[in-house]
Image (cartoon, rainbow, N blue to C red):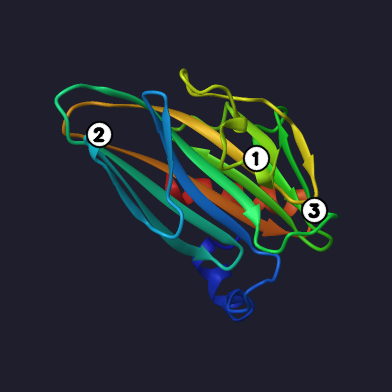
Amino acid sequence: MMNLIEKHNIEQTSGRQQSSESLLFIPGLWVNGKYYWLQDCTEKVIYDEEMTIRVKQEEVHSKIRMSSIFVSNHGNQEKEIKVLAMHHFSNVGKDNLTFVSPLDNRIFHHTNKQVYLVNAHYQRIGLTEYTAMPLWNVYTDQIWSSLQSGTLKYQPLAKGPAASVFALKMAIKPHETGKMITWSINGSNKNELIALEDALIKNIH
């Protein structure tokens, strides 16, 4: 298989065309019973917790969007947090389908023409906690079965205007920074998505 850079050079022309059904990515953070979303920004300071969260996006391939999320602990105590990631389509369609697959440990978003795969790694550990919710619930407390413990309400499937949310545990020591990598891949079928993801993982490890 050709590497990702070669494939990107071949396909970069199609990558310039922004799909009307592109998948939006909104990062977030849960800490001490509270949650914060980074809407329309790439960095947020959480003064009460002495923490910052910063997002860096990279284009490694015309069909892959990879984001690195950096969480810094500026305090003197270790922080047990969860990094959050929400994905939903920019074009809200009644035929869209969002579902989480425990068998694959991945999230899938379907439109009429495209399939998107969502996954993440932290210290080589993938997704273990995720949900699919109606879009009008995702910025509310409705996504939680327990906000105090940071436990998402598990729902495997949502149709129409919907979003996926995953949470990934991270322990950050004082004055240190944790890094999580997440990505979304679009293609026409699951086999294509898995092949692109395999190539991506070989490049980032």
Q: Position of residue 202 (x, y in %)?
A: 50, 47
Q: Secondary structure at mark 2?
A: helix
Q: Secondary structure at mark 3?
A: loop
Q: Cα distance, mark 1 to mark 2? A: 26 Å
Q: Cα distance, mark 1 to mark 3? A: 16 Å
For residue 172, above or below residue 67: above
Q: Position of residue 44 (x, y in %)?
A: 32, 49
Q: Which residue is mark 1?
A: 137
In front: label 2 or label 3: 2
Q: Amino acid at mark 2?
A: Asp
Q: Amino acid at mark 1?
A: Asn
Give the number of the disc on residue 96. 3
Q: Cα distance, mark 2 to mark 3? A: 38 Å
- Which residue is rendered at x = 53% and y = 59% of the image? 65
Give the number of the disc on residue 48. 2
In the shown orientation, is residue 190 left or right of residue 58? right
